[in-house]
Image (spheres, rainbow, N blue to C red):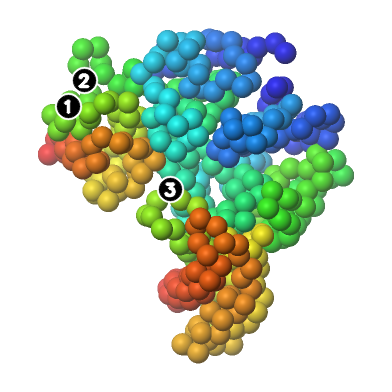
Amino acid sequence: MAKHHVAATVNGDAVEFLCETEETLLDVLRDQLGLTGTKEGCSTGDCGACSVTVDGRLVCSCLMLGVEANGKAIGTIEGMAQGEELHPLQRKFLEHAALQCGVCTPGFLVASKALLEKNANPTETEVRYWLAGNLCRCTGYDKIVRAVLDAAAEMRGA
Amino acid sequence: MQYEAPTSLDQAVALLANARGEARVLAGGTDLLVQMRTDVVEPALLVDIKGIAELREVREEAGGFRVGAAVTGAELKEHAALKRAWPGVIEAANLIGSTQVQGRATMGGNLCNGSPAADSVPALIAAGAKASIVGPKGRRELPVEDVMIGPRKLALEKGEIIASFLLPKKAPRSADAYLRFIPRTEMDIAVAGCGVSLTLDAGGTCTAARVGLGAVAARPLLVAEAAKALIGTKLDDAALARLDAAVRAACKPIDDKRGTIEYRTKVAGVLARRAAQIALERARKS
């Protein structure tokens, strides 16, 4: 069976790749495109470490085939900082020590960015529900939630 | 493994009808990809149906809605008119998985995955939704309660696809609601679930009702006796007690890690009372 030829954009850049049907978008990002910021956790859509956006919609890249990305706009953690300048969420995660081992962090950042694009002023409850699909075994979540709320306030100019 | 992404229902049906090995429809993939990874299913052919217009649209039809089977939970949540008309169906669909899963998961997939605990199914049953099924012999409609016939077993022939769901025109002073019980606040599978849809007359007496139950039998159930307990009443305590009893009588759950038979049965009755009260409040305001 011939490989599939896929054309998409990743963080605004046009990319093309060949993949087998079985390869997930996560496999393609990491193994073919060298974008290893997106992490593999559970591989079953429970942990959120592999979170990316597809046409602006937050998804688990382990639950999507690479071939399904054809014609789509993919957003990953690598698209978050502007050169050397960190996104406010990234800065606030550092300030609040909202990470320890760091494996879940790219997923949390991508998911949090997707939240703030839809809702610039979320309540703590809204942040916690939105991020319920992102698991962290180090922080106990409180620091992450505080970092997201603080970043949201800064981005609103509050 | 072959992958096809047809752009018409005819093409999709032909691919599935002519498949030699195991063929699977790929909608959101949130169940299917997990099952493929764990070798529960090993399809020779995947038919991605998201390129077919009808499956991805919500449109008003005959005063109600035709909801594409591959519309995602996140998209359903953003459809204001649909959410206003059938809030119970939308809240049920939105209970499935995380934000990430909502970005991909669909009601067609939730039904066709064939789990007795699928959250959107009892709500669709309560709403009186019909599945619009397309196959080699053409199109047919089947009430949602008749689609799943047992765990992982569907009343679909080879080559048939659920294209859309038909939600009926909402009567005046009517509303629906869905509740499920899980031991945590998010990201879990129902111990029991109950959808209630009801209609009131001008005096506040219930004139029509439907009650759907999930996770308490081999398949989601429409419980006619539970609806009868509400019809002709103003949902007073006695009527709610009869509803609770009728729901408990319909339960045939299994014991598993999520709950015992006794626990699931008791919880189903409680959920039915509470969902009926939410539907009642909504119907009074509608």
- Measure how far apart labels 2 and 1 are at the Cα level: 10 Å
Q: Nearer the viewer, residue B64 or B28?
A: B28
State the residue at coordinates (58%, 30%): B37
Side (left or right) of B90 relative to A103: right
Name the kind of residue labelled 3 in the image: Met
Select label 2 or label 1 by which is in front: 1
Q: Are marks 2 and 1 on the same chain?
A: yes
| Residue B8 can be seen, yes or no | no
- The residue wearing badge 3 is B187
Chain letter, disc 2 residue: A
| Label 1–label 3 contact, CB within 8 A | no
Identify residue for label 2. Answer: A86
Tell me the element at label 1: helix
Tell me the amino acid under the disc marked 1. Answer: Leu
Q: Residue at x 55, y 10 (%)?
A: A17
- Note whether B230 is above or below A14 in the view shown: below
Q: In this view of the protein, which residue sits in the foreground, A70 or B170?
A: A70
Instruction: Report in which chain the residue with disc 3 lies.
Output: B
Q: Which residue is mark 1?
A: A94
Q: Where residue B61 sits in the image (x, y, percent)?
A: 65, 55
User: Mark 2 or mark 3: which is in front?
Assistant: 3
Under circle 3, the secondary element is loop
Residue sitting at x 53%, y 71%:
B262
> What residue lies at 24% left-to-right and 49% top-to-bottom?
A123
Q: Secondary structure at mark 2?
A: loop
